[in-house]
Image (cartoon, rainbow, N blue to C red):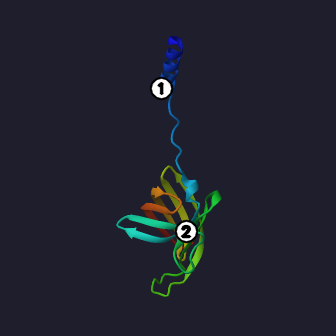
């Protein structure tokens, strides 16, 4: 009986000393989908997940194979009524940083975002940089 108790105790000690598996992070695959209704709070922007982009409203859809569609103003005028267009682009990610390159009415935009949080309903980011390149 004493031997069984010692063996059981030894097994528990060995199991408890094993390295625990690293927690599984959600990763950027959760980013794939449409994000709309940006809410700005200082330097933080919160997007809501949607089934699709809303007509004539800003939104961004991250697609597989690092492609994206950004719905944004179709011209320089920001006075309502706003007319939007869909611009094709690409995205890459590393850790919590997402790099975006997308067209706009006057050229291209290169952005870097830091993902603060991401789940099935909300995407919270902080924009690190935004560079506009005019002309083509």
Residue 85 relative to residue 76: left or right: right
Identify the mark nearer the N-term, 1 or 2.
1
Residue shown at 53%/12% (left/top)?
A: 1
At which x and y percent is residue 44? 39, 64
Q: CA distance from mark 1 to mark 2?
A: 46 Å
List x then y, in percent, for residue 123: 48, 62
Q: How would you rate the neighbour count of disc 2 (Cα within 10 Å): few for under 14, some for 14-19, many for 20 or more?
A: many
Q: Relative to residue 77, is residue 127 depicted above or below? A: above
Q: Secondary structure at mark 2?
A: strand
Tag count: 2
13 to 52, vertically: above or below: above
Q: Quadrant of residue 29?
A: bottom right
| Residue 60 - label | 2
Query: Which residue is at the far right?
Result: 65
Do callouts 1 and 2 mark residues in contact (Cβ within 8 Å)? no
Residue at the extreme left: 42
- Residue at which label 1 appears: 17
Residue 28, given in percent of the width and then of the height, sits at 55, 54
Residue appearing at x 50%, y 22% in the figure: 14
Front-lying residue, 48 or 63: 48
Residue sitting at x 51%, y 38%: 22
- Quadrant position of the C terminus in the picture: bottom right
Is the residue marked by circle 1 packed among few (<14), some (14-19), or many (20+) residues within 10 Å? few
């Amino acid at each position: 009986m004493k031997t069984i108790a010692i063996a059981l105790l030894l097994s528990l000690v060995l199991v408890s000393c094993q390295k625990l598996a690293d927690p599984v992070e959600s990763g950027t695959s959760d980013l794939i989908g449409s994000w709309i209704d940006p809410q700005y709070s200082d330097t933080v922007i919160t997007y809501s997940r949607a089934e699709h982009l809303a007509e004539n409203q800003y939104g961004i859809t991250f697609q597989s194979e690092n492609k994206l569609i950004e719905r944004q103003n179709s011209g320089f005028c920001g006075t309502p009524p706003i007319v939007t267009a869909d611009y094709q682009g690409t995205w890459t990610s590393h850790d919590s940083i997402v790099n975006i390159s997308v067209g706009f009415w006057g050229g291209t935009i290169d952005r870097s975002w830091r993902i603060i949080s991401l789940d099935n309903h909300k995407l919270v980011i902080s924009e690190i940089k935004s560079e506009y390149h005019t002309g083509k």
